[in-house]
Amino acid sequence: MRRALVGFLVLGFFLVGGLVLAQEAAPYQPDRPWESIDIAIVLDTSGSMQPLLDAARLKLWEIINDLSEAEPTPHVRVAFLTYGHLMRRPEDTWVKVWTPFTDNLDLVSQRLFEAKISGDTEYVARVLDVAFRQLEWTESDDALRLLFVVGNEAADQDPVLTLEDVGQDAIQRGIVVNAIFCGSHKVATARSWMRLAEASGGNFATIDHRRNVAMVGSPFDKELVQLSEAINQTYLPLGLRGQEGRIAQAAQDRRALKLDLAAAATRAQTKASVLYITSWDLLSALESGELSLAELAEEELPEEMRLMGPQERVVYIEDTLVQREELRQRIHELSRERRRYVAEVARRNRTDTTMSFDTAIRKAIRQHATDKGFSFPEEERDEE
């Protein structure tokens, strides 16, 4: 661990703004667009879709963990939208942007848990139009722009926009729309979802959203959760938003654990990966190398560092970085053991997960990312 500690930048949170259907969001321009993957997750939250929302909450970390294996390592941003909820206003076309594109995965998890089920106005074309126009998509032909829209009613109900309209718009914008229908591909309703995928150049898939989505547990889960709690102690909050970030981190830990011990274990793997970005943490700012410690205002420092001298701060940061890296390595080791164990259980039980929410998303991401130039290791396990 190097002694010369220079350069970190505290990146701010951004909050979800109001929905303005006609407004075009400013495009996002990253430094390395060829490593950028935008993923918009669009869920139907009408009355019968609670199992779908539960699956998204449970499987978010598995989806992110799969992406963390990509080469080169992508910069992943996730947006979350819902449609069909009774409490959305008609002028907002029953659409809600819960979070625009963000690499703050704790925020995405928080919004998934805040979403509620109610209603029956399911305008698929309209929610796609909102996603195209309001989200700040990466502006580069090198970036991978993916949208996953999931629902169980006909996709062509919108009285204003047709599937062909939004399909052509998606193609012109370079956004790949993947249509996921909750039900059998043999029913008549599925045909509109097939049309959407065909019109937009994306994938069509079917899932059984009512199927039990419980995860496979392993002997390694308990220690992974303990390591997840331990690594939290290596996060050094910067000012008020740092305190808020630490609270949010712990809250999502508790929510994952309440869902399932295995879900909390997969979240631990995410927290040890480079895709888990915390703009509120001093060490993360240090690892990015964009802000000088000497330039940081006293009130922005973690409370435990304020009475330290300059050299004491350097030593304290280095020691905490070493501790974090050791915890990360142990989490990586146990996560590999967990994957092998779960693969063996799936093979032994002949588990069929071809109709699960995360399988449909992970399969499509791998396909589109591979087409874009990313590579993935051979999977050690069947899908959970």
Image: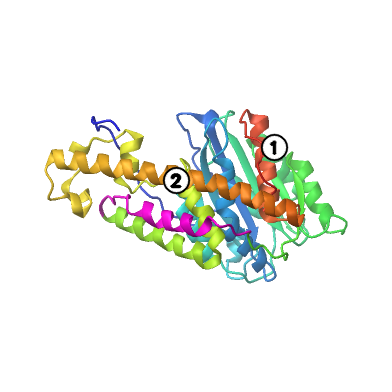
Who's the residue at 45% across and 60% down the image?
Answer: 253
Describe residue 308's horizontal placement relative to residue 371 as left or right.
left
Q: Residue at x 70, y 62 (%)?
A: 122
Q: Nearer the viewer, residue 197 or 184?
A: 184
Category of crowding for the residue at label 2, using alpha-carbon neighbours closer than 10 angstroms: few (below 14), some (14–19), many (at least 20): some
Q: Amino acid at mark 2?
A: Arg
Q: Is residue 332 above or below residue 249?
A: above
**SS at circle 1:** helix
The magenta stretch is 216-239
Q: Amino acid at mark 1?
A: Gln
Q: Position of residue 42 (x, y in %)?
A: 62, 54
- Please name whichever residue, 324 or 67, is drawn nearer the observer in this view of the structure: 324
| Residue on which disc 2 sits | 330
Crowding at label 1, few (<14), some or many (≥20) Cα neighbours within 10 Å? Answer: some
Which of the 4 image quarters holds residue 323?
A: top left
Does the segment drawn in magenta span residue 232? Answer: yes
Residue 384, given in percent of the width and then of the height, sits at: 67, 53
The disc at residue 92 is: none
The residue identified by callout 1 is: 367
Q: Is residue 21 visible?
A: no
